[in-house]
Amino acid sequence: MIRNFFKVALRNITRQKAFSAINIFGFAIGLAVCMIISFYVYDDLSYDRFHERSNDIYRLLTKDTSVEDLMYGITSGPLVAGMKEGVPEVLAATRVSNNGRDNIRRADIEQEEDAEQIHTFTLIADTDFFDVFDFKILAGNSETPLKDPNGIYLTPEKAEHVFGDDDPIGKPVDFMEIDGAYVAGIVEQPPTNSSVFYECIVPFRLDWNPIWWDSWRNVALTGYVLLSPDADLPSVKQKIIDYAADNGFAAIWQPQLQKLVNVHLDSGNLRFDTMNFGKGDRSKVISTGIIALFVLFIASINFINLSSARAAKRAKEVGMRKIIGSGRKDLILQFLGESLLITYFAMIIALAIFEISIPHLNEFMHQQTSIDLIRNPHIFLAILGAVTLVGLLAGFYPALIISGFKTLSVLKGSFHTSKSGKILRRILVVGQFTISISLISAVFIVKSQIDYLNNIDIGYNRENVVDLPFQNGEHLQAYQEKVRQLPGIESIGMINSLPGGTLQKFQVFPEGEKTEDGAMFDKIQIDSGLIPTLKMELVYGENFNADMGEANIDNVIINETALRYAGWEGDPTGKTIRIQRENDTQETKTVIGVVKDFNFTTTRRMINPMFLDYSEENFAFLVRINEHQSDTFLAAVEDIYHEFYPEANFRATYLDDVYNFQFRQDQAFASFIAGFSIIAIIISCLGLLGLSSYMTEQRTKEIGIRKVLGSSVMQIVKLLSVDFTRWVVLANFIAWPLTWYAMNLWLNEFVYRMNINVGIFLISGLAVIVIALLTIGVQTVRAANANPVKSLMYE
């Protein structure tokens, strides 16, 4: 019997080729999209959960109580070091510092110049690192890891890169100016879903940076603690706060705890978030998860709609089967079997699309995620379960209804499909187009917000400004002088941070400050050329004096927000501020000017109080050039650069590109939504095409009679289209308020945000209506042009 069901199912699928193709490929595309999005959502939600005690591991944060909603991803070194003694619930605590990329090479080769110089991403960590985390030591010293200050740990990939096939354990290396450095062990590579990333781990040494790392008044390290499983979290938090306060932690700072499994997605508001590799955004994960469900919902609606609509065509087949002895149960099983067979075909196609798409999407999304369905059977079973559920729902409704028809009525052709079935189909059509319109509107709003941020006044002019490479040292001044002589240069300036970078923060006490805590000010180091290079506006006072050189270090320039905080009225030049330095001393400087507020970090946050300090040794060498000479200028600078630094790579960056980089994730997110919105529209239109084909076929005789009575082609097209158009228009009115509410929540993340224009909804709605009309127009025009004689002879 099962074999017969299978044969009949295949025969019906191949007999109705167009219907089967729309159903299979429409559902396959929707399922593939849902799988792809769910894959990325699953990856984001799985971050750091591979640690056996992930729910008991916390990262220490620092709340700045002088500024609303300001939190740092770093903490005080002594606070972490004393945690096991100061808080009984803490089982282990580790200080970690992200040292960025360092050069490493093996030192056991006689001709050291022949040893290849290799870059490695380095973490500095103390001895509790392997007690807090589950990273395994694969070879070497696993008994007392990170206790020998000269013993470093490499990942297998990095060890192979440095030593090739040779055993690296115990071999010397030239690394970070560590005398006697050697490879003490091999540590496993962190998985791609780890917020803690390294290629090399180095033992923690206070003597490398005692002012920052061994001071209760400075926050400069990342701290992690492992709590006992039965720890009362509110109690632990209070004990940490009390312990910090009792030991001299700055009064404006308050330690906080963040669960390790939340680090990846819930750190969007953090400053100095240096230990968060592959940082994500929970709101975007939720949004993409909802999109996945929406697309699957649309594809499932199509499948159920078309299956129930086409089932009525098989009423006579059902009647004949009843006559020859088939029971209602047999008929229900037949319909369910066919429906499941189609959905399983679709699943195979969807899995193929999934496997082909993931590598390309990884490249587009700048990610390295991967998944093996064989090693993760629960994921495959979830997909199989969802597919089976859709297949059962699509087959159950027509099976139940049609199998219940009276045999005589069916064979006479006097049965009618139920009114409830028509209402259900209309509701489902409205639902899928509501989702499609919402997605398209959301894409327009995201792109409009990014355009808005690109065009707002950020307080400085970034056009035609280039960040040129340089190296501090004896050649710097000669290199800069040669660059200055090139034609097309308007001005040159130096600065220690580029837009979007992390700024240093210092506790500042303006003249007349009545509190003991002062406030945390952002600090930027510049030279006298920076303000004219970026065309910043001085509200009061003057710029640093180029002729004074290092004598400028006694002066500062503040921004308007700092002026407001200080409570000074009018021109503040001549007033002073006291700056709390790293070594617990205070330095007094004189304000010589006030610069108009400018946004140098992110447009998601308010501008903080800031002071501009003078320095001639900075990170960035900015040059404003004539826009008509950009190509020849960069070629000339590269020649000069290699004249002074022949072995170094030349890489110049436009400040516009640096600024726009902070929107890269938002732009990728917008493109992500746009792509899947288009797919959602295509799937909806495929369903509409199939449904309109069915509805037109049902009214074949009516169309013939109307043509005989004198109706024109346009009148018939209007008659057939108006019903579908009405439901698509209704979908617009449902989608607009829902989208407005959801996108306003997203826009509220930005300090600078656009106002949603009603035109966005009108354009989105009109576009979908036009696409829907074009889709059903193919069928309606064909039906309207059919020979009425053949139409009247139909069935």
Image (cartoon, rainbow, N blue to C red):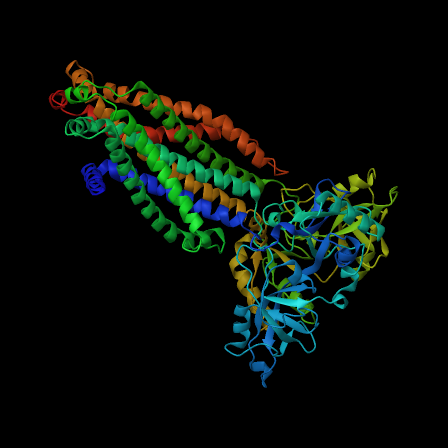
Give the percent coordinates (x, y) of residue 22.
28, 37
Taking depth in this image into account, of 721 and 770 the one nearest to the observer is 721
199 is higher (above) or lower (below) than 328: below
Locate residue 307: give its quadrant: top left
**Quadrant containing the N terminus in the rendered view:** top left
615 is higher (above) or lower (below) than 737: below
Do we see residue 589 in this rendering?
A: no
Please state if 358 lies on the left or on the right of 160 as rendered.
Answer: left
Taking depth in this image into account, of 615 and 218 the one nearest to the observer is 218
Q: Residue furthest bottom?
A: 110
Locate residue 20: give its quadrant: top left
Taking depth in this image into account, of 577 and 400 the one nearest to the observer is 400
Taking depth in this image into account, of 475 and 723 the one nearest to the observer is 723
Please state if 751 lies on the left or on the right of 724 as rendered.
Answer: right
**Quadrant containing the C terminus in the rendered view:** top left
Give the percent coordinates (x, y) of residue 189.
55, 64
Do we see residue 703 in this rendering?
A: yes
Q: Residue furthest top?
A: 709
Give the percent coordinates (x, y) of residue 773.
32, 28
All told, the count of numbered labels is 0
| Residue at the (62%, 57%) spot, across then down | 623
Give the percent coordinates (x, y) of residue 712.
20, 18
Please state if 203 lies on the left or on the right of 378 as rendered.
Answer: right
